[in-house]
Amino acid sequence: MSLALAKVAPPPDDGITAQETGSTETGSAARVSAARPFIEFEKVTVRFGKGDKQVQALSETSLSIQEGDFVALVGPSGCGKSTLLKLVGDLLKPSTGHVFVGGRELGATPIRIGMAYQNPTLLPWMNIRDNVMLPLKIVPPFRSEFSAKRKTEFRDRVEALLAQVGLAGFGEKFPWQLSGGMMQRANLCRALIHEPDLLLLDEPFGALDQFTREELWQIMQDLWMTKKTTVLLVTHDLREAGFLANRICVMSARPGRILDDSSVAFARPRSIDMTYEADFVALNQRLRSLIVEARGGTGIVQAGGH
Amino acid sequence: MDGLSDLIRRKSASIALIIGVFVFWEVACLIGGISDIVLPRPTQIIASLIQYWPAIRPHAAQTLFTTLAGFGIGVLIGVAFGVAIGSSRLAYDTAYPLLVGISSIPKVAVVPIFVLWFGAGTVPAILTAAIICIFPIVVNVATGIATVEPELEDVMKTLKASKWDILWNVSLPRAMPYFFASLKVAVTLAFVGSVVAETVASNRGIGNMMMVASSTFNVPLVFAGLFILAGLGVGLYAIFSLAENRITGWAHRKDLAVT
Protein backbone atom coordinates (compact mmCIF):
# COMPACT_ATOMS: atom_id res chain seq x y z
CA MET A 1 0.00 0.00 0.00
CA SER A 2 1.54 3.26 -1.02
CA LEU A 3 1.00 5.96 1.48
CA ALA A 4 1.78 9.53 0.73
CA LEU A 5 0.71 12.85 2.07
CA ALA A 6 1.38 15.80 -0.11
CA LYS A 7 0.65 19.34 0.79
CA VAL A 8 -0.57 21.13 -2.27
CA ALA A 9 -0.62 24.61 -0.90
CA PRO A 10 0.55 26.12 2.36
CA PRO A 11 -2.17 27.48 4.62
CA PRO A 12 -2.39 31.15 3.79
CA ASP A 13 -2.53 33.62 6.64
CA ASP A 14 -3.40 36.75 4.73
CA GLY A 15 -7.13 36.16 4.52
CA ILE A 16 -6.93 35.27 0.87
CA THR A 17 -7.34 31.66 0.12
CA ALA A 18 -5.48 28.74 -1.19
CA GLN A 19 -5.05 29.00 -4.88
CA GLU A 20 -4.44 25.63 -6.33
CA THR A 21 -3.28 26.32 -9.82
CA GLY A 22 -4.46 23.07 -11.27
CA SER A 23 -1.21 21.29 -10.50
CA THR A 24 -2.41 17.72 -10.69
CA GLU A 25 0.34 15.68 -9.16
CA THR A 26 1.70 12.23 -9.97
CA GLY A 27 0.03 11.54 -13.29
CA SER A 28 -3.30 10.70 -11.69
CA ALA A 29 -5.07 12.92 -14.18
CA ALA A 30 -6.32 10.19 -16.45
CA ARG A 31 -8.53 12.60 -18.28
CA VAL A 32 -6.97 15.36 -20.25
CA SER A 33 -8.77 18.43 -19.07
CA ALA A 34 -9.19 21.59 -21.05
CA ALA A 35 -7.48 24.83 -20.20
CA ARG A 36 -10.04 25.48 -17.49
CA PRO A 37 -10.46 23.04 -14.64
CA PHE A 38 -13.85 21.36 -14.27
CA ILE A 39 -14.91 23.53 -11.35
CA GLU A 40 -13.38 26.91 -10.75
CA PHE A 41 -14.10 29.50 -8.10
CA GLU A 42 -12.74 32.91 -8.96
CA LYS A 43 -12.61 35.27 -5.98
CA VAL A 44 -16.05 34.19 -4.82
CA THR A 45 -17.67 35.74 -1.77
CA VAL A 46 -21.14 35.12 -0.38
CA ARG A 47 -23.03 37.44 1.91
CA PHE A 48 -26.50 36.89 3.28
CA GLY A 49 -28.88 39.61 4.40
CA LYS A 50 -28.56 43.36 4.16
CA GLY A 51 -27.18 46.26 6.19
CA ASP A 52 -26.32 45.58 9.82
CA LYS A 53 -27.68 42.08 9.74
CA GLN A 54 -25.43 41.10 6.89
CA VAL A 55 -23.53 37.89 7.44
CA GLN A 56 -20.57 36.95 5.37
CA ALA A 57 -20.73 33.22 4.76
CA LEU A 58 -17.77 32.92 2.45
CA SER A 59 -14.81 35.26 2.28
CA GLU A 60 -12.95 35.58 -0.97
CA THR A 61 -12.35 32.05 -2.14
CA SER A 62 -10.61 30.71 -5.18
CA LEU A 63 -10.53 27.01 -5.80
CA SER A 64 -10.26 24.71 -8.73
CA ILE A 65 -11.22 21.08 -9.04
CA GLN A 66 -10.22 18.78 -11.85
CA GLU A 67 -12.66 16.55 -13.65
CA GLY A 68 -12.97 13.11 -12.11
CA ASP A 69 -11.56 14.20 -8.77
CA PHE A 70 -13.03 13.35 -5.38
CA VAL A 71 -12.79 16.39 -3.12
CA ALA A 72 -13.90 16.57 0.50
CA LEU A 73 -14.67 19.83 2.29
CA VAL A 74 -14.21 19.74 6.05
CA GLY A 75 -14.32 22.45 8.67
CA PRO A 76 -16.12 23.66 11.78
CA SER A 77 -19.91 23.83 11.59
CA GLY A 78 -21.34 26.91 9.97
CA CYS A 79 -18.13 27.57 8.06
CA GLY A 80 -19.71 27.77 4.64
CA LYS A 81 -19.05 24.25 3.39
CA SER A 82 -22.65 23.80 2.33
CA THR A 83 -22.65 27.30 0.88
CA LEU A 84 -19.79 26.29 -1.36
CA LEU A 85 -21.68 23.19 -2.41
CA LYS A 86 -24.78 25.20 -3.18
CA LEU A 87 -22.76 27.56 -5.33
CA VAL A 88 -21.57 24.66 -7.44
CA GLY A 89 -25.10 23.29 -7.67
CA ASP A 90 -26.35 26.67 -8.89
CA LEU A 91 -28.68 26.89 -5.91
CA LEU A 92 -27.07 30.12 -4.78
CA LYS A 93 -25.50 33.06 -6.59
CA PRO A 94 -22.16 34.43 -5.43
CA SER A 95 -22.26 38.00 -4.09
CA THR A 96 -19.02 38.75 -5.91
CA GLY A 97 -16.74 36.67 -8.09
CA HIS A 98 -17.49 33.91 -10.52
CA VAL A 99 -18.11 30.20 -10.38
CA PHE A 100 -17.33 28.21 -13.48
CA VAL A 101 -18.46 24.64 -13.90
CA GLY A 102 -17.49 22.70 -16.99
CA GLY A 103 -15.71 25.76 -18.34
CA ARG A 104 -18.80 27.94 -18.38
CA GLU A 105 -20.23 30.32 -15.88
CA LEU A 106 -23.00 28.98 -13.70
CA GLY A 107 -26.51 29.20 -15.03
CA ALA A 108 -25.30 28.43 -18.53
CA THR A 109 -23.84 25.09 -17.52
CA PRO A 110 -25.06 22.19 -19.58
CA ILE A 111 -23.63 19.60 -17.18
CA ARG A 112 -25.70 17.12 -15.25
CA ILE A 113 -25.59 17.26 -11.49
CA GLY A 114 -26.64 14.72 -8.89
CA MET A 115 -27.16 15.67 -5.27
CA ALA A 116 -27.67 13.85 -1.99
CA TYR A 117 -28.24 15.28 1.46
CA GLN A 118 -28.17 13.75 4.91
CA ASN A 119 -31.95 13.70 4.79
CA PRO A 120 -32.72 11.07 2.14
CA THR A 121 -35.95 12.89 1.10
CA LEU A 122 -37.29 9.88 -0.78
CA LEU A 123 -40.88 10.46 -1.87
CA PRO A 124 -43.09 8.40 0.46
CA TRP A 125 -45.78 7.73 -2.14
CA MET A 126 -43.39 6.04 -4.55
CA ASN A 127 -41.59 2.75 -4.22
CA ILE A 128 -37.80 2.70 -4.27
CA ARG A 129 -37.59 1.97 -7.98
CA ASP A 130 -39.77 4.94 -8.92
CA ASN A 131 -37.93 7.14 -6.46
CA VAL A 132 -34.60 6.30 -8.01
CA MET A 133 -36.07 6.75 -11.48
CA LEU A 134 -37.32 10.27 -10.76
CA PRO A 135 -34.32 12.12 -12.27
CA LEU A 136 -34.83 10.22 -15.54
CA LYS A 137 -38.29 11.75 -15.69
CA ILE A 138 -36.86 15.24 -15.47
CA VAL A 139 -33.37 15.36 -16.93
CA PRO A 140 -32.90 15.47 -20.71
CA PRO A 141 -32.24 13.45 -22.81
CA PHE A 142 -33.92 10.74 -20.68
CA ARG A 143 -36.95 12.93 -20.15
CA SER A 144 -38.28 12.54 -23.69
CA GLU A 145 -37.89 8.76 -23.59
CA PHE A 146 -39.26 8.31 -20.12
CA SER A 147 -42.74 7.03 -20.88
CA ALA A 148 -41.42 4.68 -23.56
CA LYS A 149 -38.56 3.19 -21.55
CA ARG A 150 -39.70 3.34 -17.95
CA LYS A 151 -40.83 -0.26 -17.95
CA THR A 152 -37.87 -1.63 -19.92
CA GLU A 153 -34.47 -0.02 -20.26
CA PHE A 154 -34.75 2.47 -17.42
CA ARG A 155 -36.15 -0.12 -15.11
CA ASP A 156 -33.24 -2.45 -15.79
CA ARG A 157 -30.87 0.40 -15.22
CA VAL A 158 -32.40 1.20 -11.85
CA GLU A 159 -32.31 -2.45 -10.83
CA ALA A 160 -28.64 -2.71 -11.84
CA LEU A 161 -27.73 0.35 -9.81
CA LEU A 162 -29.74 -0.87 -6.83
CA ALA A 163 -27.93 -4.19 -7.04
CA GLN A 164 -24.62 -2.37 -7.06
CA VAL A 165 -25.39 -0.75 -3.70
CA GLY A 166 -26.79 -3.95 -2.22
CA LEU A 167 -30.46 -3.14 -2.66
CA ALA A 168 -31.29 -5.86 -5.20
CA GLY A 169 -34.90 -6.90 -4.80
CA PHE A 170 -35.89 -3.81 -2.84
CA GLY A 171 -37.28 -1.89 -5.83
CA GLU A 172 -40.89 -2.66 -4.91
CA LYS A 173 -40.49 -1.62 -1.29
CA PHE A 174 -41.58 1.75 -0.03
CA PRO A 175 -39.17 4.10 1.73
CA TRP A 176 -40.68 3.58 5.19
CA GLN A 177 -40.04 -0.13 4.91
CA LEU A 178 -36.30 0.51 4.69
CA SER A 179 -33.72 1.24 7.37
CA GLY A 180 -31.86 4.54 7.44
CA GLY A 181 -28.82 3.05 5.75
CA MET A 182 -30.90 1.49 3.01
CA MET A 183 -32.73 4.74 2.39
CA GLN A 184 -29.41 6.50 2.08
CA ARG A 185 -28.27 3.93 -0.47
CA ALA A 186 -31.42 4.56 -2.47
CA ASN A 187 -30.72 8.28 -2.13
CA LEU A 188 -27.25 7.74 -3.63
CA CYS A 189 -28.81 5.78 -6.47
CA ARG A 190 -31.21 8.63 -7.15
CA ALA A 191 -28.28 11.02 -7.29
CA LEU A 192 -26.45 8.80 -9.78
CA ILE A 193 -29.12 7.27 -12.02
CA HIS A 194 -28.95 10.05 -14.62
CA GLU A 195 -25.16 9.64 -14.91
CA PRO A 196 -24.24 13.05 -13.61
CA ASP A 197 -20.96 14.72 -14.48
CA LEU A 198 -20.83 16.03 -10.97
CA LEU A 199 -22.02 14.56 -7.70
CA LEU A 200 -22.65 16.86 -4.73
CA LEU A 201 -22.87 15.19 -1.33
CA ASP A 202 -23.79 17.13 1.78
CA GLU A 203 -23.10 14.93 4.81
CA PRO A 204 -24.87 12.01 3.19
CA PHE A 205 -23.81 9.54 5.88
CA GLY A 206 -24.07 11.88 8.86
CA ALA A 207 -27.15 10.34 10.43
CA LEU A 208 -26.03 6.72 10.25
CA ASP A 209 -24.41 4.52 12.85
CA GLN A 210 -20.70 3.88 12.45
CA PHE A 211 -20.92 0.41 10.94
CA THR A 212 -23.53 1.38 8.39
CA ARG A 213 -21.52 4.45 7.60
CA GLU A 214 -18.36 2.47 6.94
CA GLU A 215 -20.31 0.08 4.76
CA LEU A 216 -21.60 3.00 2.74
CA TRP A 217 -18.13 4.49 2.42
CA GLN A 218 -17.07 1.31 0.70
CA ILE A 219 -20.11 1.36 -1.55
CA MET A 220 -19.44 5.00 -2.35
CA GLN A 221 -15.83 4.19 -3.17
CA ASP A 222 -16.90 1.37 -5.49
CA LEU A 223 -19.40 3.62 -7.21
CA TRP A 224 -16.82 6.34 -7.69
CA MET A 225 -14.22 3.91 -8.98
CA THR A 226 -16.59 2.55 -11.61
CA LYS A 227 -18.20 5.84 -12.64
CA LYS A 228 -15.35 8.31 -12.16
CA THR A 229 -17.81 11.13 -11.58
CA THR A 230 -16.40 14.30 -10.10
CA VAL A 231 -17.50 14.34 -6.47
CA LEU A 232 -17.66 17.16 -3.99
CA LEU A 233 -18.31 15.88 -0.48
CA VAL A 234 -19.12 18.01 2.54
CA THR A 235 -18.54 16.20 5.81
CA HIS A 236 -17.77 16.59 9.49
CA ASP A 237 -16.16 13.23 9.65
CA LEU A 238 -12.41 13.37 9.04
CA ARG A 239 -12.12 9.60 8.69
CA GLU A 240 -14.80 9.74 6.03
CA ALA A 241 -12.95 12.50 4.20
CA GLY A 242 -9.66 10.61 4.38
CA PHE A 243 -11.20 7.33 3.32
CA LEU A 244 -13.14 8.65 0.34
CA ALA A 245 -11.42 11.72 -1.02
CA ASN A 246 -8.41 12.36 -3.24
CA ARG A 247 -8.13 15.83 -1.87
CA ILE A 248 -9.28 17.46 1.34
CA CYS A 249 -9.94 21.17 1.74
CA VAL A 250 -10.12 22.46 5.29
CA MET A 251 -12.24 25.56 5.77
CA SER A 252 -12.01 28.19 8.47
CA ALA A 253 -14.83 29.30 10.73
CA ARG A 254 -17.28 31.80 9.28
CA PRO A 255 -16.67 33.63 7.05
CA GLY A 256 -15.28 30.54 5.42
CA ARG A 257 -12.12 30.37 3.43
CA ILE A 258 -9.89 27.50 2.54
CA LEU A 259 -7.15 27.10 5.12
CA ASP A 260 -5.51 24.01 3.89
CA ASP A 261 -5.59 21.88 0.79
CA SER A 262 -4.09 18.40 1.02
CA SER A 263 -4.07 15.58 -1.44
CA VAL A 264 -4.71 12.11 -0.11
CA ALA A 265 -2.79 9.54 -2.07
CA PHE A 266 -3.64 6.27 -0.36
CA ALA A 267 -3.97 3.52 -2.95
CA ARG A 268 -7.44 2.39 -3.95
CA PRO A 269 -9.44 0.44 -3.22
CA ARG A 270 -8.99 1.58 0.34
CA SER A 271 -10.11 -0.59 3.22
CA ILE A 272 -11.59 0.34 6.56
CA ASP A 273 -8.54 -1.19 8.24
CA MET A 274 -6.42 1.39 6.47
CA THR A 275 -8.12 4.11 8.47
CA TYR A 276 -6.39 2.80 11.60
CA GLU A 277 -2.89 2.80 10.12
CA ALA A 278 -0.31 5.31 11.26
CA ASP A 279 -0.20 7.46 8.13
CA PHE A 280 -3.96 7.77 8.01
CA VAL A 281 -4.15 8.62 11.69
CA ALA A 282 -1.42 11.21 11.20
CA LEU A 283 -3.41 12.86 8.40
CA ASN A 284 -6.48 12.77 10.57
CA GLN A 285 -4.72 14.39 13.47
CA ARG A 286 -3.24 17.11 11.32
CA LEU A 287 -6.66 17.96 9.88
CA ARG A 288 -8.19 17.83 13.32
CA SER A 289 -5.72 20.28 14.80
CA LEU A 290 -6.35 22.63 11.87
CA ILE A 291 -10.06 22.59 12.52
CA VAL A 292 -9.65 22.99 16.26
CA GLU A 293 -7.50 26.00 15.54
CA ALA A 294 -10.03 27.35 13.06
CA ARG A 295 -12.78 27.06 15.65
CA GLY A 296 -10.73 28.91 18.21
CA GLY A 297 -11.24 32.52 17.30
CA THR A 298 -9.47 33.33 14.04
CA GLY A 299 -12.78 33.31 12.23
CA ILE A 300 -14.30 35.77 14.67
CA VAL A 301 -11.47 38.25 14.22
CA GLN A 302 -11.84 37.91 10.47
CA ALA A 303 -15.54 38.70 10.68
CA GLY A 304 -14.72 42.34 11.30
CA GLY A 305 -13.12 42.66 7.89
CA HIS A 306 -14.98 43.35 4.69
CA MET B 1 -56.98 -13.09 13.84
CA ASP B 2 -56.51 -11.34 17.09
CA GLY B 3 -56.41 -7.97 15.35
CA LEU B 4 -59.66 -8.73 13.54
CA SER B 5 -61.63 -9.71 16.63
CA ASP B 6 -60.19 -6.66 18.34
CA LEU B 7 -61.51 -4.52 15.50
CA ILE B 8 -64.96 -6.09 15.73
CA ARG B 9 -65.03 -5.52 19.45
CA ARG B 10 -64.07 -1.87 19.01
CA LYS B 11 -66.64 -1.29 16.28
CA SER B 12 -69.46 -2.98 18.18
CA ALA B 13 -68.62 -0.99 21.29
CA SER B 14 -68.89 2.29 19.39
CA ILE B 15 -72.16 1.24 17.74
CA ALA B 16 -73.59 0.23 21.12
CA LEU B 17 -72.60 3.58 22.56
CA ILE B 18 -74.26 5.52 19.73
CA ILE B 19 -77.49 3.50 20.11
CA GLY B 20 -77.22 4.02 23.86
CA VAL B 21 -77.26 7.79 23.41
CA PHE B 22 -80.54 7.59 21.48
CA VAL B 23 -82.05 5.20 24.01
CA PHE B 24 -81.08 7.59 26.79
CA TRP B 25 -82.69 10.47 24.87
CA GLU B 26 -85.88 8.45 24.40
CA VAL B 27 -86.08 7.34 28.03
CA ALA B 28 -85.20 10.78 29.42
CA CYS B 29 -87.97 12.41 27.38
CA LEU B 30 -90.47 9.79 28.53
CA ILE B 31 -89.55 9.98 32.22
CA GLY B 32 -89.19 13.75 32.26
CA GLY B 33 -92.46 14.17 30.39
CA ILE B 34 -90.87 16.52 27.86
CA SER B 35 -93.36 17.70 25.28
CA ASP B 36 -92.62 16.91 21.63
CA ILE B 37 -92.93 20.62 20.86
CA VAL B 38 -89.77 21.17 22.91
CA LEU B 39 -87.80 18.01 22.17
CA PRO B 40 -89.39 15.14 20.27
CA ARG B 41 -88.28 11.61 21.05
CA PRO B 42 -86.15 9.73 18.49
CA THR B 43 -89.04 7.36 17.76
CA GLN B 44 -91.33 10.30 17.00
CA ILE B 45 -88.70 11.79 14.72
CA ILE B 46 -88.31 8.52 12.84
CA ALA B 47 -92.09 8.20 12.60
CA SER B 48 -92.42 11.64 11.05
CA LEU B 49 -89.48 10.88 8.78
CA ILE B 50 -91.41 7.90 7.43
CA GLN B 51 -94.73 9.72 7.37
CA TYR B 52 -93.45 12.75 5.43
CA TRP B 53 -90.87 10.89 3.32
CA PRO B 54 -92.51 11.66 -0.07
CA ALA B 55 -92.47 15.35 0.85
CA ILE B 56 -88.96 15.26 2.34
CA ARG B 57 -87.31 13.45 -0.56
CA PRO B 58 -87.26 16.29 -3.15
CA HIS B 59 -86.02 18.71 -0.47
CA ALA B 60 -83.23 16.35 0.49
CA ALA B 61 -82.31 15.89 -3.16
CA GLN B 62 -82.24 19.65 -3.65
CA THR B 63 -79.99 20.19 -0.64
CA LEU B 64 -77.68 17.38 -1.69
CA PHE B 65 -77.47 18.89 -5.17
CA THR B 66 -76.71 22.45 -4.06
CA THR B 67 -74.21 21.19 -1.50
CA LEU B 68 -72.31 19.01 -3.94
CA ALA B 69 -72.37 21.65 -6.69
CA GLY B 70 -71.10 24.27 -4.26
CA PHE B 71 -68.54 21.86 -2.89
CA GLY B 72 -67.32 21.06 -6.41
CA ILE B 73 -66.89 24.72 -7.26
CA GLY B 74 -65.24 25.32 -3.91
CA VAL B 75 -62.75 22.49 -4.48
CA LEU B 76 -61.77 23.78 -7.92
CA ILE B 77 -61.27 27.34 -6.73
CA GLY B 78 -59.68 26.22 -3.46
CA VAL B 79 -57.10 24.00 -5.14
CA ALA B 80 -56.23 26.69 -7.68
CA PHE B 81 -55.74 29.29 -4.95
CA GLY B 82 -53.94 26.83 -2.71
CA VAL B 83 -51.42 25.96 -5.40
CA ALA B 84 -50.86 29.62 -6.22
CA ILE B 85 -50.48 30.66 -2.58
CA GLY B 86 -48.30 27.69 -1.69
CA SER B 87 -45.87 28.21 -4.53
CA SER B 88 -45.60 31.96 -4.84
CA ARG B 89 -44.51 34.44 -2.25
CA LEU B 90 -46.38 37.27 -3.96
CA ALA B 91 -49.63 35.32 -4.11
CA TYR B 92 -49.18 34.40 -0.45
CA ASP B 93 -48.70 38.00 0.63
CA THR B 94 -51.66 39.36 -1.35
CA ALA B 95 -54.23 36.59 -1.35
CA TYR B 96 -53.83 35.29 2.18
CA PRO B 97 -55.06 38.38 4.07
CA LEU B 98 -57.88 38.68 1.55
CA LEU B 99 -58.94 35.08 2.15
CA VAL B 100 -58.77 35.41 5.91
CA GLY B 101 -60.93 38.52 5.64
CA ILE B 102 -63.51 36.82 3.45
CA SER B 103 -63.63 33.72 5.59
CA SER B 104 -64.28 35.74 8.75
CA ILE B 105 -67.46 37.21 7.28
CA PRO B 106 -70.47 35.27 8.59
CA LYS B 107 -71.85 33.47 5.55
CA VAL B 108 -75.44 34.36 6.44
CA ALA B 109 -74.50 37.95 5.71
CA VAL B 110 -73.58 37.26 2.11
CA VAL B 111 -76.73 35.34 1.23
CA PRO B 112 -78.81 38.52 0.70
CA ILE B 113 -76.14 39.77 -1.70
CA PHE B 114 -76.31 36.58 -3.73
CA VAL B 115 -80.11 36.80 -3.71
CA LEU B 116 -79.85 40.35 -4.98
CA TRP B 117 -77.60 39.24 -7.80
CA PHE B 118 -79.08 35.89 -8.77
CA GLY B 119 -82.56 35.80 -7.22
CA ALA B 120 -83.74 33.42 -4.50
CA GLY B 121 -83.37 29.67 -4.95
CA THR B 122 -80.66 27.33 -6.13
CA VAL B 123 -77.83 29.67 -7.13
CA PRO B 124 -77.36 31.47 -3.79
CA ALA B 125 -77.31 28.09 -2.03
CA ILE B 126 -74.61 26.76 -4.34
CA LEU B 127 -72.50 29.90 -4.02
CA THR B 128 -72.81 30.02 -0.25
CA ALA B 129 -71.75 26.39 -0.02
CA ALA B 130 -68.83 27.13 -2.34
CA ILE B 131 -67.41 30.12 -0.49
CA ILE B 132 -67.72 28.44 2.88
CA CYS B 133 -65.60 25.48 1.81
CA ILE B 134 -62.93 27.32 -0.16
CA PHE B 135 -60.98 28.51 2.85
CA PRO B 136 -60.05 25.20 4.53
CA ILE B 137 -59.07 23.77 1.15
CA VAL B 138 -56.85 26.73 0.26
CA VAL B 139 -55.12 26.72 3.62
CA ASN B 140 -54.42 23.00 3.55
CA VAL B 141 -53.28 22.75 -0.05
CA ALA B 142 -51.06 25.81 0.38
CA THR B 143 -49.54 24.32 3.54
CA GLY B 144 -48.86 21.01 1.83
CA ILE B 145 -47.14 22.70 -1.08
CA ALA B 146 -45.20 25.25 0.93
CA THR B 147 -43.75 22.65 3.31
CA VAL B 148 -41.83 20.60 0.77
CA GLU B 149 -38.44 19.84 2.32
CA PRO B 150 -35.88 22.41 1.16
CA GLU B 151 -33.36 19.60 0.59
CA LEU B 152 -35.75 17.91 -1.79
CA GLU B 153 -36.30 21.16 -3.62
CA ASP B 154 -32.53 21.57 -3.94
CA VAL B 155 -32.22 18.07 -5.36
CA MET B 156 -34.93 18.88 -7.90
CA LYS B 157 -33.35 22.21 -8.79
CA THR B 158 -29.95 20.68 -9.41
CA LEU B 159 -31.74 18.39 -11.85
CA LYS B 160 -32.87 21.58 -13.58
CA ALA B 161 -36.49 20.71 -12.89
CA SER B 162 -38.92 23.44 -13.85
CA LYS B 163 -41.40 24.87 -11.35
CA TRP B 164 -44.04 22.82 -13.09
CA ASP B 165 -41.95 19.62 -12.77
CA ILE B 166 -41.55 20.20 -9.06
CA LEU B 167 -45.23 21.00 -8.60
CA TRP B 168 -46.44 17.99 -10.53
CA ASN B 169 -43.96 15.39 -9.26
CA VAL B 170 -43.36 16.51 -5.71
CA SER B 171 -45.53 19.30 -4.31
CA LEU B 172 -48.96 18.18 -5.45
CA PRO B 173 -48.67 14.52 -4.44
CA ARG B 174 -47.17 15.68 -1.18
CA ALA B 175 -50.15 17.99 -0.57
CA MET B 176 -52.67 15.18 -1.11
CA PRO B 177 -53.04 14.13 2.56
CA TYR B 178 -53.59 17.78 3.49
CA PHE B 179 -56.06 18.11 0.63
CA PHE B 180 -58.13 15.13 1.71
CA ALA B 181 -58.14 16.24 5.32
CA SER B 182 -59.55 19.56 4.14
CA LEU B 183 -62.12 17.85 1.90
CA LYS B 184 -63.64 16.12 4.89
CA VAL B 185 -63.98 19.43 6.68
CA ALA B 186 -65.15 21.25 3.57
CA VAL B 187 -67.91 18.81 2.66
CA THR B 188 -69.54 19.14 6.06
CA LEU B 189 -69.16 22.92 5.92
CA ALA B 190 -70.76 22.96 2.47
CA PHE B 191 -73.97 21.64 4.08
CA VAL B 192 -73.91 24.53 6.50
CA GLY B 193 -73.63 26.95 3.60
CA SER B 194 -76.41 25.52 1.48
CA VAL B 195 -78.82 25.04 4.39
CA VAL B 196 -78.23 28.59 5.64
CA ALA B 197 -78.97 29.95 2.18
CA GLU B 198 -82.07 27.77 1.85
CA THR B 199 -83.34 28.91 5.21
CA VAL B 200 -82.96 32.57 4.27
CA ALA B 201 -83.92 32.59 0.64
CA SER B 202 -85.36 29.55 -1.05
CA ASN B 203 -88.58 27.65 -1.43
CA ARG B 204 -86.82 24.33 -1.73
CA GLY B 205 -84.32 22.31 0.24
CA ILE B 206 -84.09 20.91 3.75
CA GLY B 207 -83.39 24.35 5.21
CA ASN B 208 -86.60 25.73 3.76
CA MET B 209 -88.55 22.64 4.82
CA MET B 210 -87.39 23.08 8.41
CA MET B 211 -88.37 26.74 8.37
CA VAL B 212 -91.88 25.87 7.18
CA ALA B 213 -92.19 23.01 9.66
CA SER B 214 -91.14 25.14 12.62
CA SER B 215 -93.59 27.87 11.68
CA THR B 216 -96.39 25.27 11.97
CA PHE B 217 -94.90 23.85 15.19
CA ASN B 218 -94.27 20.50 13.51
CA VAL B 219 -91.20 19.99 15.69
CA PRO B 220 -90.72 16.28 14.89
CA LEU B 221 -90.45 17.25 11.21
CA VAL B 222 -87.86 19.92 12.06
CA PHE B 223 -85.81 17.25 13.81
CA ALA B 224 -86.40 14.89 10.91
CA GLY B 225 -84.73 17.53 8.72
CA LEU B 226 -81.78 17.63 11.11
CA PHE B 227 -81.51 13.85 10.95
CA ILE B 228 -81.45 13.97 7.17
CA LEU B 229 -78.70 16.61 7.19
CA ALA B 230 -76.66 14.66 9.70
CA GLY B 231 -77.10 11.48 7.67
CA LEU B 232 -76.03 13.16 4.42
CA GLY B 233 -73.06 14.76 6.15
CA VAL B 234 -71.88 11.50 7.65
CA GLY B 235 -72.35 9.73 4.31
CA LEU B 236 -70.23 12.22 2.36
CA TYR B 237 -67.62 12.33 5.08
CA ALA B 238 -67.38 8.55 4.93
CA ILE B 239 -66.97 8.61 1.14
CA PHE B 240 -64.08 11.05 1.35
CA SER B 241 -62.49 9.13 4.20
CA LEU B 242 -62.55 6.04 2.05
CA ALA B 243 -61.07 7.89 -0.91
CA GLU B 244 -58.43 9.34 1.38
CA ASN B 245 -57.36 5.92 2.58
CA ARG B 246 -57.25 4.64 -0.97
CA ILE B 247 -55.29 7.51 -2.47
CA THR B 248 -53.06 8.68 0.33
CA GLY B 249 -52.58 5.42 2.20
CA TRP B 250 -48.83 6.10 2.18
CA ALA B 251 -49.38 8.91 4.64
CA HIS B 252 -51.25 6.66 7.09
CA ARG B 253 -48.86 3.78 6.91
CA LYS B 254 -49.09 2.67 10.52
CA ASP B 255 -51.25 -0.31 9.64
CA LEU B 256 -49.10 -1.30 6.69
CA ALA B 257 -45.62 -1.11 8.14
CA VAL B 258 -43.53 -4.17 7.59
CA THR B 259 -40.69 -4.22 10.01
Image (tube, rainbow, N blue to C red):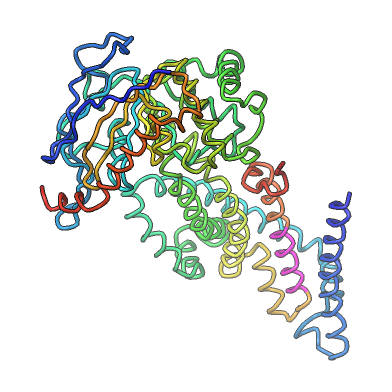
> Is residue B192 left or right of B153 when viewed as pictured?
right
Q: Residue at x 28, y 8 (%)?
A: A32
Q: Quadrant of residue B161?
A: top left
Q: Is residue A29 left or right of residue A172?
A: left
Establish if B151 lies above or below B82: above
On the rendered structure, is B82 left or right of B57?
Answer: left
Q: How many numbered circles does the render carry?
A: 0
- Pick whichever, A122 or B252, lies toward us: A122
Q: Where is residue A139, by image quadrant?
A: top left
Q: Check the image and report above or below for A294 versus B31.
A: above
Residue drawn at (72%, 59%) of the image? B234
Please report the bounds of the magenta region as a residue range. Answer: B221-234
Up-down relation of residue A217 to residue B178 (above or below): above
From the viewer's side, name the closer residue of A175 and A135: A175
**Main secondary structure of the magenta stretch:** helix
Residue A227 position, x and y percent, is 44, 16
* Residue A27 rendering spot, x and y as whole percentages: 29, 10
Would you say residue B230 sits in the magenta stretch? yes
Query: From the viewer's perspective, is A32 left or right of A52?
Result: right
Residue A22 or residue A162, whichever sits in front:
A22
In this picture, is A125 found above or below A133?
Answer: below
**Residue A289 at x, y = what percent?**
30, 43
